[in-house]
Amino acid sequence: MTIRSKAPLRLGLAGGGTDVSPYSDIYGGAILNATVDMFAYTTIEPTDDGKVVFYSPEKHLREEYSNAMEVDTDGYFILYKGVYNRIVKDFTHRPLSLRISSFVDVPAGSGMGTSSTLVVSLLGAFVEWLKLPLGEYDIARMAYDIERIDLGLAGGKQDQYAATFGGFNYMQFEGDNVIVNPLRIRERYQDELCHNLLLYYTDTSHVSADIIKEQQNNVRNRVGSSIESMHKMKEQAAQMKEALLKGEIDRIGDILDFGWTNKKQMAKNVSNPHIDNIYNVAKAAGASGGKISGAGGGGFMFFYCPGLTRHNVADALTSQFGGDVRRYEFTTEGLKTWTMGS
């Protein structure tokens, strides 16, 4: 028997950072994101030898434990271990015997929610295998708790919910409460957005934790400029929702540009001279706005290119900075799981 799962990565279109505590606890946050056809995959192969084997086919790394009620959360497989420990603690109350592996369609640190999406994929495979009574909100919340509380990794709440629910969602965050509002966007509007929104990999990565910790400290220390920029990011999410639902797709470049200006005020390492240069070159080539995906510092960027300007923008970026433009489509589904064999 083989159990598999996949969860989609996301583009954070607006409101990024307002899902992070303590801002979301004090002021309430709002995010608009959409999932794309790039995934985190997990495979579980049950065994009967009493061993827990974590394996990465991408890195050719392997760790093995025997009769493990709990494994130390260090090393390469920290996310695997966090999920395994929570499943044993909350559900089986006994060691499991299995081989578990995963891979992701984009590199770590790319700004598309890879870590959280992987946690959702890992958790989904256990739900499928053990027939756990968890719905979408339960899975997303448990994934958040594993990553942020059990493992102490800094970050927000949007990625776990995006990966679990899939599609275009306007999410609201009020303390511990998360409300996912699926958006019924006409197909032609989605197609136009996909046609005009160019996804560019800068061939760099980032460590989001440092940026997020600075953002959190700015809120705790009541840094007015940073908090005000987060308020503007929340406004941006509402603007983006209105534009998508009304089909005012060419407004999106300006909305992204408005958000990028404010996002850079949230923490000092959101951008850097290299990223600013990429952004300026894209706009000079015809883009009307854009942003870096995720917390900032590196990874993917995307740009709204009205009319037929995407080709000029792509040529300008790749010729001056390298990297590459990635093909993608928006997806309507979130986490999927299935079992093969008896």
Image: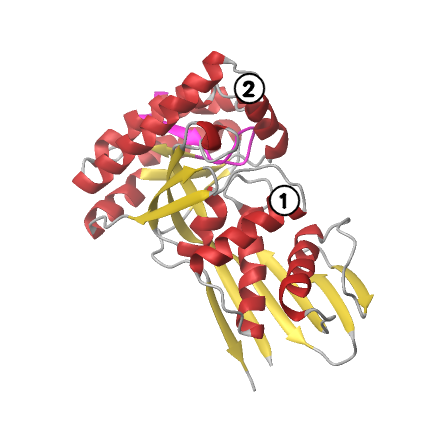
Q: Where is residue 89, by image quadrant?
A: bottom right
Cα distance, mark 2 to mark 1?
21 Å
Which is more toward the observer, 274 or 339? 339
Residue 292 colored in magenta in the image: yes
Give coordinates of residue 52: x percent, y percent: 75, 68
- Residue sitting at x 53%, y 24%: 270
Q: Which residue is mark 2?
A: 218
Reply above or below: 28 against 47: above
Q: Which residues are magenta?
A: 284-301
Dot 1 amino acid type: Ile
- Residue sitting at x 73%, y 50%: 76
Give coordinates of residue 108: x percent, y percent: 60, 44
Numbered disc 2: secondary structure: helix
**Crowd class of label 1 (few under 14; some 14 to 19; many from 20; radius 10 Å):** few
**Picture quarter with the N terminus:** bottom right
Q: Which residue is mark 1?
A: 149
Which is more toward the observer, 67 or 253? 67
Give coordinates of residue 252: x percent, y percent: 28, 32
Tell me: 200 left or right of 221.
left
